[in-house]
């Protein structure tokens, strides 16, 4: 059957046609790749080798692959293309044909594999000059040969009856790859004597690097892909056991060195990424071959190749079309450095020790090459990645270097935080502490523990007794606390034994409050570290004898005496924190009755500090700390699984739950003022965060009280209780939110009470239809609705924190059903109810996935929501919530199969017609009433922008068209005062060119466009698209005459908003130039003395100060990112900034003018450009040095100093 198939298949293979196609080519303009794909397709359909076996494993029938015979036939058929009579172009086509055929083969026999590989090597070398000889054609032939060789090496070699070992196949692959790369790197200057008669280079493999460096990037990449193909091909081999072949290991070792040699000197990020990925693959595939010969693997060669690239120094270009990033390169590099399977304990030349050394060099280098804070932080993160689960393999010397470096880095970071340098310094300190704890935990049973933990503590512990308040003392306390918190019993016990006695000595120091405070804080830190160690150990920490037993009672006794003394408040707060830490972590059984009496009094005193009226401002810090700490202790006393005496000691637990919790709750609810209640509320919030049990009790009680007070009309306490719920939801963590959504009182119940919900009235409205809406409202009813709206919005605003996460389905359904009942509203009270619930509804749409049934109903909500959002009569907060709801419906809750965007109906029936009506009303109104109408137009255009941004975020074709139309409409309206785009059946807006209203509508449209591109949701590409539309339209507007352009506020406003909102990286150079010119002309237009003669301004329609502030902000931003381009306009910007400062009309404009001058001096590189302005700047700034505002005076001094 196989032979019949062969006989039928062979005549259909177009070998002769392919050969003729190759022979007829005389240039490289043809599609050689198309021929390659044809050959690949044909050979991909041929038969593979098959073997049929019976149940006993005996071969019953076996067929050979048709690939081998037909590939041999193709080679023979294409032989004329490689004769001397042919030109290089013919060879390129023939090699592409062979490449496709090899790619299509599933397997090849070893003889064919070897024969074809040897043939291809000869064409990887420099070629003899032919009739069509040119350097380009020769290089293309060699490239085609390398590509075909790559496909060959990737193809598996089939098994046969002959004895063929893995070593033979691997050797042939490696030989082909090394020789192929070496030959391809050879130049025409190499003599024929450098190659044998089979195309193999006679030079050393190390000689190829010079030629490799001369190849262009694309050809180097092709060579690297040949090496990667070899690695992947070897990866297909299944090892049955340990490799005992010394020659094979030596071969792979040599090939690894050959591959790493390619990395030396490589600077192109694309090739570097390719090589790093290849080395990562090589390590994972080759290492199993060396399991029994670990010492022969060339670890040092790999390290020497990659070490110079650490750390990666690469900044991607603005248009990063290849997707190469610094983080990607760094990750690939660290993947190599963290491969240490063969590292032996203590081996200084292991990959781990070598890598650790090069990373540490970056952390603390020489003083003339100090790293930045960001570099230090990245280095520590690299150390965490490098050392995780491998610390014990470091040599003693490397471990000591690591310990010293981390202590120094931690000290520097902690000192920076102490002196107010937050941000990176704090991150460095935190990262150091994480790494220190990780290393200490992993070394718990290692000899290296003595170097990393024991030695530093023994050396520096004495400072805790002599000067814990010093910078070094505080840093030492924090560092040792990290060691104690590692989770190992050995580190915890040793730290307490060495450090706690020293701190107790300092604690007894009479008269030195700074030392006592520092010692108290240190004791608190060590008690807290015990709890962290317990958690990190997963309950495996040895607690017999208990590590705290020798210290808790003694420390508590001393701290209690100090707390009762007359010390300054900072010292008392430090002592208080230490007592809290001790009380929270100390378990039952290691204290005596007198100690429990101290703790009882301490808890009662804490409660008194929280609940007493706010009168002593000097005590505020202690009271705030007491509120937080008391809440945390209440939480622990109710925490499931807590071992603290607060939970396990019955008398303490009863005191907290039966007395203190009730007293604090009562204080929070019944306090006469909000400020008196605030500390109690904070305390309750912290208790909720610590215990789900407390959270359920508290939230349920507060929601019940709130409901009853609203029901009875006692509005005087409603806002205070609602604020208490809001603070608890904000500070009480997930426990508070979960309890809120499972409370007996649903927020919808509160909305119904506030909004006078009446089931009978609702049914009557449904039956009577619109007739009931015709009844006039009484003044009393209007007042009631105003009050209900006020209280409703205030109360719901405190609930919003609970809606920032996904909700239980039942709560979603309840609120959704309520919105369905009142949308569209059929009465004024329903409008009130809807306005109160819409902010919660918008949050639900933002953070939750809705059921299919709910999603179906959303389409019908769009038009009534649009009516609410655009009507002038609607409450401002309700309008905002309705617009937000529309945004999330359009963006998140449309099916991908929905071909029509949900925004269409709302735009056509509500939004766009209302915009047209407002244009008409603007043209009709008198000047004195135009300001209100302009504001109405601005609001409607902003709503249009919200809908447009939502449609753009969605990304569906129908939504994309809608967003483009809306953006174009706003852009045209801003630039021309009219638009050709109609978003409904209504007419498009048009205003008279010279009208005051035109300027107002242009400014409103530009502001709305800014609202649209300010949206941060969805893909960034839609913002680029919308920005391109505006820039293109502005470029066209530049063709207008100077006078018309000069007087167009819309164009200036649009340019201003784009300069402020657009990301600098996506602005092309031509657009940057256009924006800078536009803004320079705009400054003349808005600030020159004679500007009023050219432009007609109306205060009712144009807010000049707002526009002037915007253009100054835009100038500052452009100078920051494009100083070279903006440097051409210094003669405009500096004089105008000085005029603003000298006129002193607006403090806002003056501050921006100062910032502009400061930015100009900072960013303009050429000082010669600034010299002409220096005298005037210093003179005017000198006159402002006595300005009444201290903040402004500081800014003046700073700006004057930088110009001096």
Image (spheres, rainbow, N blue to C red):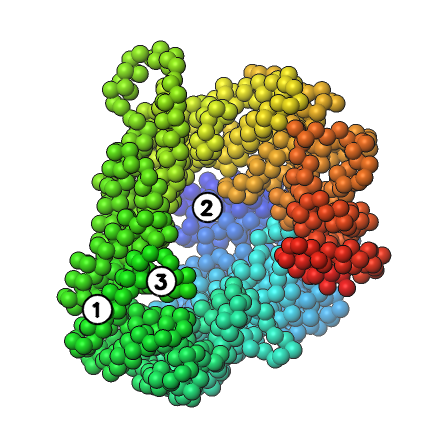
Q: State the mark number for residue 623.
A: 3
Asked if residue 818 lies left or right of residue 860, the reply is left
Looking at the picture, how far across and down is residue 1043, in whole percent? 82, 31
Location of mark 2 (residue)? 46
Rounded to the nearest angstrom, the CA distance separating label 3 from label 1 is: 18 Å
Q: Is residue 311 left or right of residue 732?
A: right
Q: Position of residue 223 (x, y in %)?
A: 61, 62
Is 1161 or 953 nearer to us in this picture? 1161
Q: Is residue 970 above or below residue 914?
A: below
Instruction: Count residues near mark 2 (Cα–Cα under 10 Å), then give few for <14, some for 14-19, many for 20+.
Output: some
Q: Earlier in the sequence, mark 1 or mark 2?
A: 2
Q: Is residue 67 above or below residue 1033?
A: below
For the residues marked 1 and 2, what is the alpha-carbon distance in whole angstroms?
A: 88 Å
Q: Residue at x 42, y 82 (%)?
A: 512
Q: Is residue 841 visible?
A: no
Nearest-to-viewer mark from 3 and 2: 3
Closer-to-camera residue (592/77): 592
Q: Identify the residue position indicated by label 1 in the image.
A: 600
């Amino acid at each position: 059957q196989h032979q019949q198939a062969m006989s039928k298949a062979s005549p259909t293979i177009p070998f002769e046609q392919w050969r003729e196609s190759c022979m007829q080519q005389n240039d490289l303009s043809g599609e050689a790749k198309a021929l390659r794909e044809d050959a690949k397709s044909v050979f991909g359909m041929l038969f593979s080798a098959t073997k049929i076996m019976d149940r006993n494993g005996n071969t019953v029938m076996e067929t050979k692959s048709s690939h081998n015979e037909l590939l041999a036939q193709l080679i023979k058929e294409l032989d004329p293309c490689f004769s001397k009579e042919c030109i290089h172009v013919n060879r390129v086509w023939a090699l592409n044909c062979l490449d496709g055929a090899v790619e299509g083969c599933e397997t090849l026999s070893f003889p064919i594999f070897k024969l074809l590989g040897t043939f291809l090597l000869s064409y990887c070398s420099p070629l003899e000059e032919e009739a069509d000889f040119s350097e380009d054609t020769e290089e293309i032939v060699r490239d085609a040969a390398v590509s075909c060789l790559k496909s060959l090496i990737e193809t598996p070699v089939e098994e046969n009856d002959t004895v063929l070992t893995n070593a033979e196949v691997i050797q042939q692959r490696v030989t082909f790859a090394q020789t192929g790369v070496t030959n391809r790197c050879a130049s025409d200057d190499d003599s024929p004597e450098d190659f044998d008669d089979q195309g193999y280079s006679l030079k050393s493999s190390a000689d190829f690097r010079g030629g490799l460096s001369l190849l262009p990037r694309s050809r180097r990449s092709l060579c690297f892909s040949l090496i990667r193909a070899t690695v992947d091909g070897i990866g297909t081999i299944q090892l049955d056991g340990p490799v005992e072949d010394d020659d094979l290991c030596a071969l792979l070792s040599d090939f690894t060195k050959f591959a790493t040699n390619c990395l030396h000197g490589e600077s192109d990020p694309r090739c570097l990424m390719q090589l790093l990925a290849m080395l990562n693959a090589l390590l994972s595939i080759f290492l199993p071959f060396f399991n029994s010969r670990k010492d022969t693997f060339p670890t040092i060669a790999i390290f020497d190749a990659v070490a110079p690239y650490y750390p990666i120094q690469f900044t991607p270009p603005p248009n990063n079309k290849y997707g190469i990033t610094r983080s990607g390169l760094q990750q690939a590099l660290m993947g190599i450095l963290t491969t240490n399977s063969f590292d032996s304990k203590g081996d200084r030349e292991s990959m781990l020790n070598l890598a650790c050394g090069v990373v540490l060099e970056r952390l603390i280098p020489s003083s003339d090459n100090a790293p930045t804070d960001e570099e230090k932080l990245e280095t520590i993160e690299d150390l965490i990645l490098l050392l995780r689960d491998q610390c014990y393999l470091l040599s003693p010397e490397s471990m000591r270097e690591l310990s010293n470096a981390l202590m120094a880095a931690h000290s520097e970071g902690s000192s920076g935080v102490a002196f107010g340098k937050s941000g990176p310094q704090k991150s460095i300190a935190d990262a150091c502490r994480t790494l220190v704890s990780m290393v200490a935990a992993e070394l718990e049973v290692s000899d290296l523990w003595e170097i990393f933990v024991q030695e530093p503590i023994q050396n520096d512990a004495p400072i805790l007794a002599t000067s814990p308040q010093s910078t070094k003392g505080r840093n030492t306390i924090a560092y040792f606390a990290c060691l104690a918190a590692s989770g190992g019993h050995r580190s915890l016990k040793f730290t307490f034994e060495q450090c706690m006695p020293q701190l107790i000595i300092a604690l007894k120091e009479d008269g030195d409050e700074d030392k006592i405070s520092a010692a108290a804080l240190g004791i608190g830190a060590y008690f807290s570290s015990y709890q962290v160690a317990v958690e990190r150990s997963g309950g495996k920490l040895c607690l017999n004898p208990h590590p705290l037993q020798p210290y808790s009672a003694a420390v508590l006794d001393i701290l209690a005496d100090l707390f009762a003394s007359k010390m300054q408040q900072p010292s008392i707060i430090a002592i208080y924190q230490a007592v809290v830490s001790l009380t929270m972590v100390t378990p039952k059984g290691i204290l005596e009755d007198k100690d429990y009496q101290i703790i009882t009094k301490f808890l009662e005193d804490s409660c008194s500090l929280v609940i007493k009226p706010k009168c002593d401002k000097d005590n505020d810090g202690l009271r705030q700390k007491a509120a937080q700490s008391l809440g945390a202790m209440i939480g622990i006393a109710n925490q499931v699984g807590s071992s603290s005496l607060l939970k396990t000691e019955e008398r303490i637990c009863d005191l907290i739950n039966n007395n203190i919790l009730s007293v604090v709750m009562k204080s929070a609810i019944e306090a006469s003022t909000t400020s008196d209640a605030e500390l109690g509320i904070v305390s309750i919030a912290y208790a909720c965060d610590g215990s789900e049990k407390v959270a359920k009790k508290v939230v349920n009680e507060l929601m019940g009280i709130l409901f009853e007070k609203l029901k009875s009309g006692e509005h005087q306490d409603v806002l205070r209780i609602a604020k208490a719920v809001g603070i608890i939801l904000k500070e009480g963590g997930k426990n508070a939110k979960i309890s809120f959504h499972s409370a007996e009182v649903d927020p919808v119940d509160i909305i119904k009470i506030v909004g006078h919900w009446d089931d009978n009235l609702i049914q009557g409205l449904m039956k009577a239809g619109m007739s009931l809406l015709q009844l006039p409202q009484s003044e009393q009813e209007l007042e009631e609705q105003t009050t209900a709206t006020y209280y409703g919005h205030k109360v719901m605003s405190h609930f919003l924190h609970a809606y920032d996460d996904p909700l239980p389905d039942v709560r979603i359904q309840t609120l959704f059903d309520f919105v369905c009942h009142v949308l569209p509203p059929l009465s004024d009270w329903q409008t009130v109810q809807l306005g109160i619930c819409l902010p919660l509804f918008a949050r639900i749409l933002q953070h939750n996935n809705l059921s299919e049934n709910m999603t179906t109903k959303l389409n019908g909500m769009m038009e009534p929501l649009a009516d609410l959002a655009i009507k002038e009569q609607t409450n401002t907060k309700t309008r905002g919530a309705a617009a937000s709801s529309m945004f999330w419906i359009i963006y998140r809750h449309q099916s991908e199969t929905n071909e029509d965007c949900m925004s269409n109906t709302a735009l056509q029936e509500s939004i766009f017609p209302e915009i047209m009506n407002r244009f008409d009303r603007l043209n009709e109104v008198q000047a004195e009433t135009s300001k209100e109408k302009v504001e109405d137009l601005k609001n409607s255009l902003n709503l249009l922008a919200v809908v447009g941004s939502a449609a753009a975020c969605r990304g569906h074709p129908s939504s994309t068209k809608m967003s483009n139309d809306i953006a174009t409409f706003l852009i045209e309206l801003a630039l021309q005062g009219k638009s050709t785009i109609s978003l409904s059946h209504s007419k498009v807006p048009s205003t008279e060119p010279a009208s005051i209203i035109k300027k107002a509508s242009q400014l409103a449209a530009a502001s709305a466009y800014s609202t649209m591109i300010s949206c941060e949701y969805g893909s960034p590409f839609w913002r680029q698209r919308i920005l391109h539309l505006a820039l293109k339209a502005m470029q066209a507007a530049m063709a207008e005459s100077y006078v018309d352009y000069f007087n167009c506020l819309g164009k200036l406003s649009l340019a201003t908003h784009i300069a402020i909102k657009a990301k600098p990286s996506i602005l092309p150079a031509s657009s940057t130039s256009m924006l800078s010119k536009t803004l320079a002309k705009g400054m003349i237009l808005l600030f020159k003395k004679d500007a009023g003669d050219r432009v007609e301004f109306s205060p009712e329609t144009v807010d000049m100060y707002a526009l002037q502030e915007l253009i100054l902000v835009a100038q500052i931003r452009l100078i920051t990112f494009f100083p070279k381009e903006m440097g051409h306009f210094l003669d405009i910007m500096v004089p105008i900034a000085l005029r603003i400062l000298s006129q002193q009309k607006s403090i806002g404009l003056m501050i921006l003018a100062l910032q502009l001058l400061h930015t100009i001096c900072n960013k303009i590189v050429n000082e010669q450009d600034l010299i002409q302005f220096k005298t005037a700047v210093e003179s005017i700034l000198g006159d402002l040095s006595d300005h009444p505002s201290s903040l402004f005076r500081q800014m003046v001094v700073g700006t004057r100093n930088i110009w001096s």
